[in-house]
Image (cartoon, coloured by chain):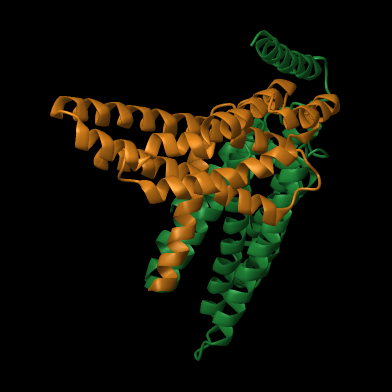
Amino acid sequence: MLSSLLWPAGLLLEFALLARSVQTKTFTKYIYFYAYISCVFIVSVGLFIGHSRTEFYEAWYWPTQFATLAIGFGVVLEVVRQALAAYPGAERFAWRASCAVFVVTFCYVEWHVASRSEWSTVAATVELERDLRVIEALVLATVLAIVFYYHIEIGKNVTGMIVGFGAYVGVSLTTLALRSFLGPGFNAVWGDLQTASYFFALIVWTVALWSYSPNPAPPSTERGNGGYDALVRGTRAQLESVRSNLRGVAGS
Amino acid sequence: MIGLLLYLLVGAGLLVFLWLLARRKGAPVEGCGRQFVEARQALRTLQLGLLPENLIERIFDREDFRYVMAASPANIREFFLRERKRISLMWVRRVRCEIRNLMQFHLGYSRLHAKLSLLAEIRLALDFGLLLLACRALRILLYMRGPYGAGAVVGVLTAAAGRVCAASEKSLAFLNPPALESFRRDSAGDGATI
């Protein structure tokens, strides 16, 4: 019930988001993010038009779901690219840590799948989505840890991207894990929660990306006279300290 | 069941991070020249004012304690312990403050450094974390057991602080004017210190 209400509303929001990105010329600035929104919009429109025909919907739901899931990694890439672009050190740290997280999680999931004795297509499909969400969640958490650790200031656009996508990934992961544990009885709640979390993400994105708000530029020691002046003042203070010490030695 | 808990933990952890991000106010602007000078001062204060071995021995030396306990009336002993506790707590507070200054500087500087080393950063983060934790533990121990009840933690703290100071010294080497360095070397022989 909830899903059938939020679906058309979500389509409208996606359209508004894309139209606004063209109007404010932010489409090219956040290319991976808007590529993801465009894909989801096209898939959602297609499924919405054909959802009355059960065969069509069932045949296309999972393939399109995986396509959007894979393109969803583009949002994570966009977050890393935008949030840390001005901080080469932190960016390098984030890429390496994210690669390590990806490799470790992927190996763990592969090992887990290989060691299973039973196999069912539906269960495997749900688990695959859950495991991909785990990787997205861990990479996002790593990037956020780096943002907090290095006190990196990020703008409204990128904060919105992270909060929206992170909330959707977090809720999806939690509900998919519960679905694997509780079984098909949880399906109705799972569907509603997933749709509601994506709708929440769309609201956050629409508000945060309504106008272009780039990340604040990092301070630089080379930029302006402030840095150099402070350095000169510090050196003078050191020299004064040396002078007073010498005066003390000479006077004794 | 353990798998479910792990997945729920990752999901909940991410949502907590997002909540923190949404609540975060503007991060402080760092990386300017003033910060380099402040970091240099913090390093000097640590190396010359707070971490020299003789100062630490002076504050935490048990000989003073034994002497006062053996040769003084009760009120003097109480006064001595109270004062020593106050001084040791003040020392920990100052060390913690200077370590935080150094950490702020390091983070502000290294995030802009393209040749940042992942291993070195993790090692330094652990050192900073250990130091701040040791400071906190030391404060609790000093409150609970008095100035002579935390010898081992003082040792850990000073060793880790020494490592951090050495790493920071390399980062801040460019702030040492070459002429002053040569002057410092020349003048050290006859006992005059700068």
Of A250 and A31, nearer the camera is A250
Picture quadrant where residue B114 is located: top right
Image: A96 above or below A243: below
Which sits in the foreground, A221 or A10? Answer: A221
Q: Residue at x 39, y 41 (%)?
A: B136
* Residue nearest the observer in this picture, B131 or A115: B131
- Chain letter, orange: B
Residue at the spot 23% in from the left edge and 25% down from the top edge: B79
Number of callouts? 0
Quarter occupied by residue A182 = bottom left
Q: Residue furthest left?
A: B74
Q: Position of residue A243 (x, y in %)?
A: 73, 12
Can the viewer see residue A178 in this picture?
no
**In the displayed image of the protein, which residue is found farthest to the bottom?**
A117
Residue B118 at what x, y percent from top left? 70, 54
Residue A146 x/y as whole percent? 62, 46
The green chain is A
Image quarter for residue B72? top left
The quadrant the C terminus of chain A occupies is top right
Q: Residue at x 67, y 57 (%)?
A: A97
| Residue at image coords 69%, 24% | B192
Residue A157 % position (x, y): 67, 34
Q: Is residue B167 visible?
A: yes
